[in-house]
Image (cartoon, rainbow, N blue to C red):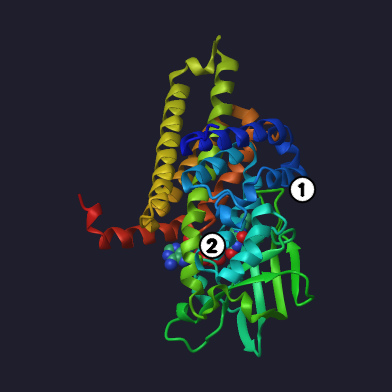
């Protein structure tokens, strides 16, 4: 019996996802975007392909893949329909936090169901008064016997309507020495009227995926849902999860940018002006060269951050750089792809208009690029290895 090497296994999985995207996703992406319709069937196929458990250890029913393969999977899905990658994006942050910080009991209770997609997960961090300033969150969790009682409102929660369980940050100690230290992380499941889903937000892009408000009104959960069983550690647990979230966002940006480039280079060879395909005009060639160069740079930064994570190295700066560069490049490339299409690029028949609307999510999600620049700068000033 032959066993495949890790590289062969990676190639097989990435090819499987690419085939799924070409066969099932690309033909319906425009319609799903237009109708803002949740692609339940595609999500079910993703469950069958094991994509809900890509980084969950095999011991708990997942595939236990590395972050380089993880990045490649997000890139492939996003070439077809970036919204679809959102179904497993914050789901992954929940599985990450459980895998790295959960008690053994919590891992056994939740990870197998999350890995199979029987339970769909999400991340409930942002609040009306606390997005970038997460530590300003107002949601509280009061201990009441063997339970916690949760009260508060979460905002912009991806998978809010169709997700089943969420990684939730709430304040357990209002008198803590610093705001961060008073925050704890819980896994909360739907099923009790104290946990209510509000309106679906009508988004310019990232359509076809539910993003909602969540309301918690005297919502009781067992004390055992406190991740890791210790209060006050939630902020650090989730920030660590967000580092891998930035690999996922950077990879999505590479995927969308690549799709925009593919459409643009194809169109440039078909559309003729002044008797020649526009690809023969130097002005268009300069755009194509810049676009492809930026995509390659973004991809390499993303894979480099993922490889460092795979080696167990510190990646706060690296994932920040990858996410910052890839998302800004994606925004520029989708605009250039639209310009290469001329008027046709502004019309909804062309996919480049969707890529252009999807690109800003990567600039905002998992930490805005403004704030990421500050995080990167702080690290640069502290870490001598970057002063070479
Ligand atoms: C489609 C979508 C899906 C999302 N999904 C989720 C989800 O699943 N779970 C979740 O928890 N959240 C989610 N979010 C929330 C997202 O993470 C936040 O929107 C983001 O962190 C920014 O927070 P904010 O919107 O409150 O902006 P604000 O924090 O109000 O920022 C406004 C502006 O001020 C800038 N700014 C703020 N503070 C500083 C500073 N110190 N220095 C410099 N500039 C600053 C920001 O960069 C931004 O430009 C989602 C958002 C969107 C749009």
Displayed quadrant of residue 229: bottom right
Percent position (x, y) of residue 121? 66, 60
Percent position (x, y) of residue 77? 61, 40
Q: Which mark is residue 99?
A: 2
Q: Which mark is residue 125?
A: none
Q: Residues within 10 Å of mark 2 (few under 14, many from 20)?
A: many
Q: Secondary structure at mark 2?
A: helix
Residue identified by numbered label 1: 40
Q: Are marks 2 and 1 in contact (CB under 8 Å)?
A: no
| In-front residue for pair 171/69 | 69
For the residue with label 2, is its CB less than 8 Å from the closest atom of ligand 1? no
Q: Is residue 124 visible?
A: no
Q: Residue furthest left?
A: 388
Left or right: where 11 falls relative to 154: left
Q: Residue at x 55, y 28 (%)?
A: 262
Displayed quadrant of residue 129: bottom right
For the residue with label 1, is its CB less than 8 Å from the closest atom of ligand 1? no
The quadrant of the rendering that contains the N terminus is top right
Ranked by sequence position, the earlier of labels 2 and 1 is: 1
Q: Residue at x 57, y 52 (%)?
A: 58
Instruction: Determine whether 287 is above or below 44 in the image.
Output: above
Q: Residue furthest top?
A: 275
Instruction: Determine whether 368 is above or below 279 in the image.
Output: below
Left or right: where 38 falls relative to 11: right
Displayed quadrant of residue 168: bottom right
């Amino acid at each position: 019996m032959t066993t495949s090497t890790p590289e062969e296994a990676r190639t097989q999985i990435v090819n499987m996802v690419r085939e799924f995207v070409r066969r099932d996703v690309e033909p319906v992406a425009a319609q799903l975007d237009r109708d803002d319709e949740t692609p339940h069937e595609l999500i079910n196929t993703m469950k069958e392909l094991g994509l809900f458990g890509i980084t969950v250890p095999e011991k708990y029913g997942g595939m236990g893949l590395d972050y380089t393969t993880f990045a490649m999977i997000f890139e492939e899905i996003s070439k077809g329909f970036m919204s679809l990658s959102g179904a497993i994006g914050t789901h992954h942050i929940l599985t990450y936090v459980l895998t790295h910080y959960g008690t053994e009991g919590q891992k056994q209770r939740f990870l197998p169901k999350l890995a199979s997609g029987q339970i769909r997960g999400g991340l409930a961090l942002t609040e009306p008064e606390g997005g970038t300033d997460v530590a300003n969150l107002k949601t509280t969790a009061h201990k009441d016997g063997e339970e916690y009682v949760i009260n508060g409102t979460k905002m912009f929660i991806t998978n809010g309507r169709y997700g089943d369980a969420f990684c939730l940050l709430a304040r357990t100690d209002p008198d803590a020495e610093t705001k961060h230290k008073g925050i704890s992380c819980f896994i909360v499941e739907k099923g009790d009227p104290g946990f209510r889903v509000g309106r679906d937000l009508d988004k310019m892009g990232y359509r076809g995926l539910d993003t909602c408000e969540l309301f918690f009104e005297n919502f009781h959960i067992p004390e055992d849902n406190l991740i890791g069983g210790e209060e006050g550690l939630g902020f650090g647990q989730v920030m660590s999860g967000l580092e891998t979230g930035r690999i996922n966002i950077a990879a999505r940006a590479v995927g969308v940018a690549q799709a925009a480039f593919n459409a643009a280079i194809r169109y440039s060879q078909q559309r003729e002006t002044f008797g020649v395909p526009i690809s023969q005009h130097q002005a268009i060639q300069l755009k194509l060269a810049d676009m492809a160069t930026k995509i390659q740079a973004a991809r390499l930064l993303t894979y480099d951050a993922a490889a460092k994570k795979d080696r167990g190295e510190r990646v706060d700066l690296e994932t920040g750089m990858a996410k910052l560069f890839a998302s800004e490049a994606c925004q520029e490339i989708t605009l250039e792809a639209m310009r290469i299409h001329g008027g046709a690029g502004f019309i909804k028949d062309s996919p480049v208009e969707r890529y252009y609307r999807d690109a800003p999510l990567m600039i905002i999600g998992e930490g805005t690029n403004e704030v990421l620049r500050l995080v990167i700068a702080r690290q640069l000033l502290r870490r001598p290895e970057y002063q070479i």
